[in-house]
Image (tube, grey):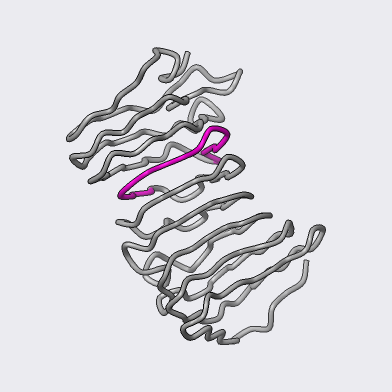
Amino acid sequence: STPVANGTNIAFGGKEGMWYVAAGIAVTNNAGFNITGTAGFTKAGAGSLTMQSTNFTGLSGGLTVDGGTLDYHPTSTATGLPANTNVTINAGSLTMTTSLPSGGNFTMGPTGALVFSATTLSVADFNGAPGASITNSSTGKTLTINNPDNCTWAGTIVSNAATNNISIVKNGVGTLFVPGNFDTPASSNTTHGILTINQGTISIPKDSSLGG
């Protein structure tokens, strides 16, 4: 693992920020730095990037993962990305050690993966292509979907163990189409999270989308 110098400030200005980590390389920031910019930040390359104790409050324009693994790990939500930040996982994996900001749109490509380690995730529009996956690495979590627009989740949400379920709360006036699997237990797990619909509609064309 390659550590990044402590106390470093990275300012991207009006250009998109990108950090490329090649396959077989792991970069870890142990003591934090400030990232600022107005055109978003992209993790690229097949390697691993751990952004521990990083201050994201000065970064706007969205967070994108295009490959490899990104561990999003600011000290707290207070030093994380601003509210309403859009998050896109085109390919690779995002480990959410600290909760992502609420209010942004959440989009996943066919090889995108989210590892749910923080307690909650609250999003606006929520879209996932076939092959996208969300898993929970620890005790039960809650995904809240506040979509104002019609959205489609065609991926899979997987509960990894009996206590590692993901409960889903549907708010927002939009319809959420679920042709994929909303809650699929692993082979050793028959426990699902709770699905609560407070507003809007969830359209589920097959019973198996709710797990077996």
Tell me where residue 108 appears, x and y as whole percent: 50, 45
The magenta segment: 121-137
Q: Residue at x 56, y 75 (%)?
A: 17
> Which of the pair 149/139 is nearer the observer?
149
Residue 90 lies, in percent from the top left, at 56, 51
Classify residue 27 by image quadrant: bottom right
Q: Quadrant of residue 62?
A: bottom left
Q: Position of residue 45 (x, y in %)?
A: 71, 61
Q: Quadrant of the N terminus?
A: bottom right
Indicate whether 156 appears above or below 15.
above
Choose between 30 and 173: the one closer to the eye.
173
Determine whether 123 is above or below 183 in the image: below
Magenta-colored stretch includes residue 133: yes
State the image coordinates of residue 120 (x, y, percent, origin top left). 38, 48
Q: Residue furthest right?
A: 24
Which picture quadrant has residue 66? bottom right
